[in-house]
Amino acid sequence: MKLLRRIFFPLWKIRARFWVRKRIKEEQEPIRKVASALKDSLKGKLDVEEKLWVKNIEQLRQELKQNEQEIIVTDFGAGSPNENRTPQEMYTGVVNSTKVSKVVCASKSPFWSLFLHKLIREFQPEKGLEFGTSLGLSASYQASAMTINGKGKLITMEGSLSLVEKAVSNFTKIGLINIETVQGRFSDNLEKVLSQNNPIDYVFLDAHHDKNATIEYFETLLPFLSDNCVIVFDDIRWSKGMKKAFSLITQNPRIKFVFDLKEMGVCILAPENKERVIYKVK
Ligand SMILES: C[S@@+](CC[C@H](N)C(=O)[O-])C[C@H]1O[C@@H](n2cnc3c(N)ncnc32)[C@H](O)[C@@H]1O
């Protein structure tokens, strides 16, 4: 899988550059902003403040990669694409003994993390919600963008207590104070988190990887999303179920902009009378 990614990712980047060139001057603001976030990520373009945060977060990633400490993780997600965990198994959680250096491999890469950072710089959300904290790397990219924006709070949710403890200490280490970390199953915490943080302007789902669960979370989110909310779905081709979930979700009438970026899907809400546009950068 990693080898395939190494081969195909450079080709995807070429296609993405073409798409950016066509869309960067679009009249419609959401399209322009996504194109701009992608352009800057492809170029690795960072201003002085961004450079400092990215340097510190990537230094943290390197430290985590070298950390051979054993850690007991409880996973309430779907595991791997071929595992076919039952809803009961996912509810109970699967307990695994692993190493920090292995857990960090499941974090978003520097490229995609930077893309999330740039999306937040462009869209300037007040309230962001992340599904799946793990060690806190993607959360750090997103919350640091809010820090630079001078506004915004990120709520990040994680089931495994051991990971929450590590993530919180990582946030402190790099100096982020605009993150609230919520421990527990999403199904147990989501409604409360949403009612306390209504409305939500930005969501990043990078966790459960199960078709029914993903659709359920989206439906629970809907009444709490602001009119122009940005929702990022990770791993939209991770399994047949995730592909189906993304395809069904994008048919919701509140979603007016869909950007299928192969690995991630970005959906943006807009008023119902607007026509939907769908871009595929595959
Ligand atoms: C891919 S990792 C997140 C990586 C992180 N976003 C990053 O890029 O640094 C997914 C995380 O979601 C958590 N998770 C999966 N399903 C969950 C559920 N139903 N409730 C709570 N946490 C869950 C897992 O424990 C795991 O740490």
Image (cartoon, helix red, strand yellow):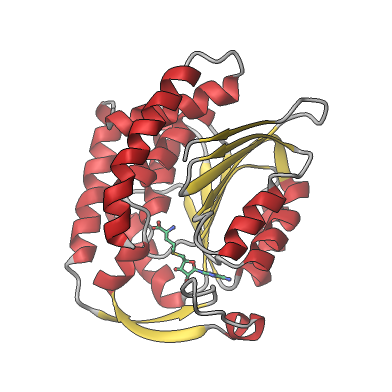
Q: Nearer the viewer, residue 153 or 125?
A: 125
| Coordinates of residue 49 in the picture (x, y in percent) | 29, 31
Taking 17 as reference, is 62 left or right?
A: left
Please indicate whether residue 13 sits to the left or right of residue 121 in the image: left
Which quadrant would the N terminus be assigned to in this image? bottom left
Q: Against 208, is 226 above or below? A: above
| Figure label count | 0
Please state which of residues 208 and 51 is positioned toward the viewer in this rendering: 208
* Quarter location, residue 51: top left
Q: Position of residue 105 (x, y in %)?
A: 31, 64
Residue 138 % position (x, y): 40, 52
Q: Identify the residue shown where x is 72% and y is 30%.
A: 276
Residue 174, image x, y percentages? 28, 51
Name the residue located 23 percent from the left edge and 64 percent from the top edge. Answer: 64
- Would you say 125 lies left or right of 61 here? right
- The structure residue drawn at horizontal position 27% and vertical position 50%, both measured from the top left corner, is 7
When the figure is inspected, residue 45 is found, relative to residue 235, above or below; the finding is: above
Q: Which residue is more in the foreground, 168 or 204?
A: 204
- Residue drawn at the location 49% of the way across and 56% of the way down: 235
